[in-house]
Image: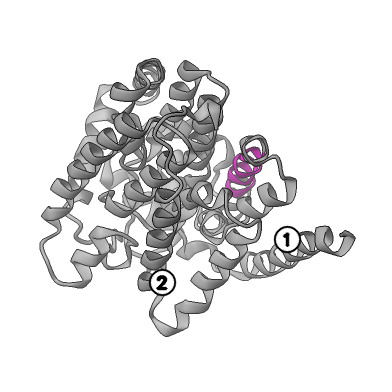
Amino acid sequence: MRKHSLFPWLVIAAQLFIYGQFWYGADKTTTDFPAFHATALVWKSGQQPYDLENQCRVEKQVNPVQPCLPFAHPPILLPAMAAVSDWNYVASYWRWTLFTSFLLVLCLIPLYFLSKDLPRAVQSMLFFPAVFGLWMGQDNALVLLSVLLFVWMLKVDKDFLAGAALSLGVVKPQLVLVLAVPLIFSRVKAFLGFFTGGFILVIFSLALVGTAGLKGILNLTVLMSKIEGFGVWPEGMYNVTGILARSGLNHFWVWPIFLLAIVSVCILWKRKNLNLATISIAIIVSIFTAPHVHLWDLSLLILPMLTLHRLAPAIGSLIIIATFPFGVTYATTYAMMLTLAILHYRTLKSGPRLSED
């Protein structure tokens, strides 16, 4: 029994060592952080942070070789980005990743209360896409935290707080809309929490960047939605957009597929209520159909894995990493998502709410 309980911690220690070695030696200028860093510095200087020319000018001072990466995320984290950023790029990178690592560690709280298993919670937090997002300087940890808090609050019947927690995920709205809109038909109070939280964040954003900044976000979003240039790289996406791009098909079709996904989850939650199975299926659907999904966004698969074996995230991480050299990572990831969806579909319950699981 002692060896059985010790083994997961040995796996966790090995992962931390391997991740740390890779992270420390990686090139910090080839991540996505230059876009975050530049936007923060532009804002600190009193200029419009969502002006592409301003962003690119500062980015080129950090790395003149890399293409300009536009920053179109809502400005929710802009004060934190500015607090950690100065003209020392590497030091700014480490301060930012310390902050996002703290957000990821906070995920342990809902993970533990949802699983009642500390090794399982820690192992879930170390799922490779989540850690890869930290290395890339992304803000996926906040989206993961918001979704996990959302599920936990639903489980303890705090619907309004659940919706408010989910609203924090609007830094990547394409990932949370599939979860938010169906609440209208299944948990109205939770949707009101999401709407209220979203409204407060809009006011907060206005205070940070003004109407010109919000218009700039829309312009950058439209520019990036064309999925051409600016480091968007649709061929590298792990969902329908990536399949269309790699097949040479028009990416326009991702939008009707995305809308169909929202409708499908509305029907699923209305008929089967909210429980870990239906929410897990919705998360998988969101990841697979969202217009913009890269490897770090797969960190949301942590929740569908949570009810499986405590080493499921480690196995998933190993599969993703091991298939990189063979060029079959995308197919393997799709198979992983399909397997998770099937497993959860087989456990669907028609009656109980999440709090009664």
Q: Residue furthest bottom?
A: 326
Q: Amino acid at mark 1?
A: Ile
The first of marks 1 and 2 along the sequence is 1
Q: Height in image: 203 above or below 22?
A: above
In the image, the segment drawn in magenta is 96-108
Q: Residues within 10 Å of mark 2 (few under 14, many from 20)?
A: some
Q: Position of residue 142 (x, y in %)?
A: 51, 39
Q: CA distance from mark 1 to mark 2?
A: 23 Å
Q: Quadrant of the C terminus?
A: top right
Q: Position of residue 90 (x, y in %)?
A: 59, 56
**Marks 1 & 2, CB-CB < 8 Å contact:** no
Q: Is residue 180 left or right of residue 147?
A: left
Principal secondary structure, stretch drawn in magenta: helix
Q: Is residue 139 left or right of residue 122?
A: left
Which residue position is annotated with label 2?
Answer: 332
Which residue position is annotated with label 1?
Answer: 12
What count of labels does the image hold? 2
Q: Which is more toward the observer, 119 or 274?
A: 274
The answer to whether any part of residue 135 appears in the image is yes
Residue at 83% from the left image edge and 61% from the top image edge: 6
Q: Is residue 100 magenta?
A: yes
Q: Is residue 211 magenta?
A: no
Q: Which is more toward the observer, 82 or 138?
A: 138
Residue at 34% from the left image edge and 21% from the top image edge: 202
Residue at 50% from the left image edge and 42% from the top image edge: 144
Q: Amino acid at mark 2?
A: Thr
The colour scheme of the drawn protein is one colour
Q: Height in image: 354 above or below 330?
A: above
Q: Height in image: 9 above or below 319?
A: above
Residue at 58% from the left image edge and 59% from the top image edge: 313
Q: Height in image: 76 above or below 305?
A: above
Q: Element under label 2?
A: helix
